[in-house]
Image (spheres, helix red, strand yellow):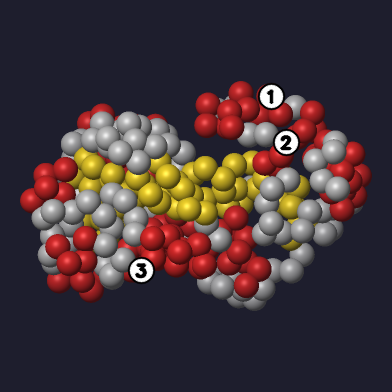
Amino acid sequence: MVHDAEVKLALAGAEPFRAPITNMQAIGYLYNWAPMHFFLRKDLAEEYNIDSLDDLATSGAPITIGINRSGNITGDIALFMLNAAGLDEATVEANGGAFVRAGANEQGELMQDGRIDMATNGIFIKHSSFRAIDENVDVVLLSIPENVVAATQEQFGTAAYTIPGGNYSNQPGDVATVALGAMVTTTDAMDEETAYKLASAFVRNIEEIRSVHSAMAQLTPELMVSQTVLPFHPGAERAYREAGLIE
């Protein structure tokens, strides 16, 4: 299972791939609703008048920012978005801040301990790591300027997304951002019958997939076939055609 953003980089042979990957094929799309979150301590946001990602670079605020570990696509996207908003590492350091590499749960702990001022990640709304931050630290959720959304879409194939107001303690209104999706992929080495059985099983057992996690409740057979990043494996395509999901 890979993020569609990772697939886009792989197809282009962009870092960290050494050359374009040409043998990937899709089995099915599983979700497209994992939005990038940028949580900032409320006291800093108020002191420096920050409510959007593009306020960070001009604010002069000394912010220590949590970024997911190297090799994690959400960390790459967070860095790209911050840079697109004008906040590069040199500016962060000049303001007295720093980037700190840490996983989702670690960022929550670092926020609670006061060792970072901002947490960034792209996971489901109200993911446990986000709830831990929201419930234990007074934070606000920063919105993303349209130009940063557009640049991120161009670079990573993400989609524009709105986090509805009221999901977090200090979030009365909707917050604009981008969202990642993920799909099950294989290579052209998989035989057609295996791919057919996999895709058929996805459709036939969709209720079981939905029950794995509350965030998967939105999954539909129609969404499974909605990805456009990769060609479907011929076996998966046959299964979806038989199910009436594609022509």
Q: Name the residue under label 3.
A: 84
User: First in sequence: mark 3 or mark 1?
Assistant: 3
| Helix, strand or loop under label 2 | helix
Residue depicted at 52% across the width and 50% down the height: 180
Image side of residue 221 versus residue 62, left or right: right
Task: Please identify the quarter of the rendering in which residue 127 is found.
Answer: top left
Residue kind at label 1, given as amino acid type: Glu
244 or 23: which is nearer to us?
244
**Labelled pair 3, 1 in contact (Cβ < 8 Å):** no
Residue type (three-letter) at the residue carrying disc 3: Ala
Residue at the extreme left of the image, as rendered: 47
- Is residue 182 visible in the rendered image? The answer is yes
Amino acid type at image mark 2: Pro
Q: What element carries label 1?
A: helix
Q: Please, what secondary structure does the residue beneath circle 3 have?
A: helix
Q: Looking at the image, how many numbered discs can be counted on the residues?
A: 3
Question: Residue 87: x percent and y percent?
Answer: 26, 67
Residue 197 in view: no
Which class describes the residues within 10 Å of circle 3: few (<14), some (14-19), or many (20+)? some
Q: Could you tell me how far apart the alpha carbons at marks 1 and 2 are, in whole angstroms? A: 10 Å
Q: Distance between the residues labelled 2 and 3?
A: 35 Å
Is residue 2 shown left or right of residue 133? right
| Rendered image: mark on residue 221 | 2
- The quarter of the displayed image where residue 148 is located: bottom left
Q: Residue at x 34, y 55 (%)?
A: 144
The residue pinned by badge 1 equals 207
